[in-house]
Amino acid sequence: MEIKVVENYQQMSLKAADIVADQVNQKKDSVLGLATGSTPEGMYARLVEMYRVKMIDFASVVTFNLDEYTALSPKHPQSYHCYMNRHLFDHINIKPENTHIPHGNNEQDISEICREYDYKIFSMGGIDLQILGIGVNGHIGFNEPGQYLQTRTHLVELAEETIEANSRFFSSPEEVPRRAITMGMGSIMHAKKIILLASGESKAPVIQKSVSGRISTDIPASLLQLHRDIVLIVDKQAVSLL
Ligand code: F6R
């Protein structure tokens, strides 16, 4: 596990965008695993700038998002579908049919949707570069802390900390969806390369626990220590407890 410490959020975003651009420039039809949330917003903004000055071309890129709420319509402004359009897809030349975000409402459909999602990732040759943020409780994607972690894409009940943390995007905590579909730990760990981004003091305790040399399902991100090609790009505040 390599840890690159940068000065601030801006530097983290630039560094991450450079890594994505290098990946896509080396392999035009790269399969990217994408995250949402506040953390990668600066990286997406930089990728849009790079696209505008022809430093990156998304024409053949394929993407798979980590997760999506189940009870929200993809048209809801806080859905991850809208997030991705707003921050990236609407501004670049990616083909809509090459972008994938899990979506489902009905419980029976969901297990089929999850199976198909994993199959699609597999049939595209797996994820070349996975981008991750990290929850204050150590979740990655929506793989929440608990006695067990799941390997495959699945339906998840969000943890209270996650509902609370994400309530900043909604007018009240009651509005935050309670359930989501997320890629599992296996799908994430199978990515050929991973970058995990973290910025700010609020992430310092969880970054400390995630790189401690110990692995626990209580801190899902701690499993990433077993990945062979992972880089943490973290600002000084996020490593202030290391
Ligand atoms: C979102 C996701 C989550 C976030 C995490 C951090 O697609 O996978 O694991 O990365 O909740 O969110 P922010 O960046 O808002 O602190």
Image: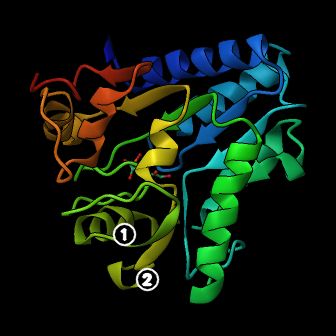
Residue closer to the observer: 158 or 87:
158
N-term mark: 2 or 1: 1
Q: Is residue 77 visible?
A: no
- Give the residue displayed 60% in from the left and 60% down from the top: 80
Q: Is residue 101 above or below residue 159?
A: above
The spot of residue 71 in percent (x, y) is 55, 82
- The disc label shown at residue 175, or none: 2
Q: Is mark 2 within 8 Å of ligand 1?
A: no
Disc 2 to disc 1: CB gap under 8 Å: yes
The spot of residue 132 in percent (x, y) is 46, 38
Q: Report the quarter where the N terminus lies.
A: top left
Q: Is residue 139 visible?
A: yes
Q: Is residue 21 above or below residue 116?
A: above
Q: Residues within 10 Å of mark 2 (few under 14, many from 20)?
A: few
Q: Is residue 98 above or below residue 112?
A: above
Residue receiving disc 1: 167
The spot of residue 40 in percent (x, y) is 51, 38
The spot of residue 90 in percent (x, y) is 81, 47
The total number of labels drawn is: 2
